[in-house]
Amino acid sequence: MFVFTTILACVGAFIAAILTLKVMVTRVDHACRLAELVRETRRLRVFHRAATAPARARRR
């Protein structure tokens, strides 16, 4: 009985480790996507400001 319980505990720990790893990978992926969106937003904001600035400000 002890061997079965030990094996069951090991299998449970293995499954928990796999699920934890999947969550960590997903969070890293989302963080990378967020960083990419922030960079793109900043780039678009700079272009928008330059395009909508008065002609005098654009000459500088």
Image (cartoon, rainbow, N blue to C red):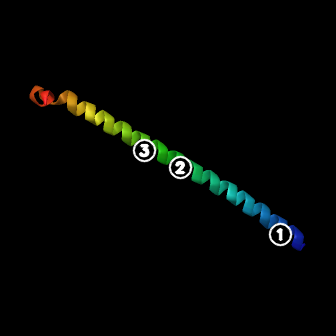
Crowd rating for badge 2 (residues with CA inside 10 Å; few <14, some 14–19, many 20+): few
Determine the secondary structure under disc 1.
helix
Res 14 label: none
- Pick out the residue farthest to the front: 60
- Pick out the residue farthest to the left: 56
Q: Exactly how many numbered labels are in the figure? A: 3
Image quadrant where one finds the C terminus:
top left
Res 28 label: 2
Residue in front for this viewpoint, 46 or 6: 46
Residue in front for this viewpoint, 12 or 21: 21
Q: How far apart are marks 1 and 2 (CA)?
A: 33 Å
- Compared to residue 26, the image places residue 12 above or below, namely below
Q: Which amino acid does label 3 sit on?
A: Ala
Q: Earlier in the sequence, mark 3 or mark 1?
A: 1
Crowd rating for badge 3 (residues with CA inside 10 Å; few <14, some 14–19, many 20+): few
Res 35 label: 3
- Compared to residue 28, the image places residue 40 above or below, namely above
Q: What residue type is labelled 1?
A: Thr
**Left or right: 32, with 18 as reference point:** left
Determine the secondary structure under disc 2.
helix
Q: Which of marks 3 and 2 is nearer the N terminus?
A: 2
**Left or right: 23, with 58 as reference point:** right
The residue at the point 73 percent across, 63 percent down is 13
Q: What residue type is labelled 2?
A: Val
Residue position for label 1: 6
Image quadrant where one finds the N terminus:
bottom right
Crowd rating for badge 1 (residues with CA inside 10 Å; few <14, some 14–19, many 20+): few
Q: Position of residue 28 (x, y in %)?
A: 53, 49
The residue at the point 69 percent across, 60 percent down is 16
